[in-house]
Image (cartoon, rainbow, N blue to C red):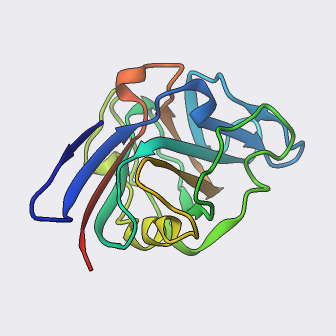
Amino acid sequence: MWFRAFAPGAGVVDIRVAASADDAEENVSSGAVNLVSTDMELVRDASVQVVGLRFANVQIPPGVRITKAHVQFATDETGSTATSLVIRGQLAASAPAFLAKARNVSARPRTTAAVSWAPAPWLVIGEAGAGQRTPDLSAVVQEAIGAAGWAAGGPIVLLITGQGRRTAEAFDGDRTLAPLLHVEFEPL
């Protein structure tokens, strides 16, 4: 993680998923949660799943305006199946790490803000470019940090649902290519 201030109260945060319990796949049918997969299917594996990403120690102070935000993924497997995803945040000031407990991803309270993403085909393994980057998630992150009790250093959780398949690196596959949250903010 790094933090760079541009003006009083403004800054940039880049933080990767940093632990096995910070990226999770939950089977929608059974509710079973997998914390140790070496990749993440967004969102179809053997069945449809909900994917959870937790970014710990996010140094964004309360009371700022989020100007840009996205998650950067890296391709673990190529794929061109039509894919339509929805990304929401967890509405909690201190979202806990995921547990290998039934419905531990899907049962979390979600933000009203949501962003749709129809990623282009992922054709090169290891690629982490514009095609593997979510659209702007500013509204989702803004609502997440607006939860009562939010403080700098808290975690942000993102929840991904939808249909289709893009396969990204997970923490347990390649830590250096684990999902990266990028956020830019400024004072209100």
Q: Tell me where residue 62 appears, x and y as whole percent.
A: 40, 66
| In the displayed structure image, the side of residue 184 where residue 23 appears, left or right | right
In the picture, measured across the screen, residue 16 lies left or right of residue 171, that is: left
Q: Is residue 134 left or right of residue 185?
A: right
Q: What residue is at 35 percent from the left and 61 percent from the top?
A: 61
For the residue pair 100 and 122, the one nearer the viewer reads as 100
Residue shown at 62% from the left, 60% from the top: 92
What percent of the width, then of the height, locates residue 184? 25, 60
66, 116: nearer the viewer: 66
Asked which quadrant contains residue 160, the reply is: bottom right
54 to 175, vertically: above or below = below
Assign the N terminus to one quadrant of the image.
top left
148, above or below 89, in the image: below
Out of 64 and 130, give the one closest to the viewer: 64
Residue closest to the far left: 6
Q: Position of residue 82 (x, y in %)?
A: 53, 55
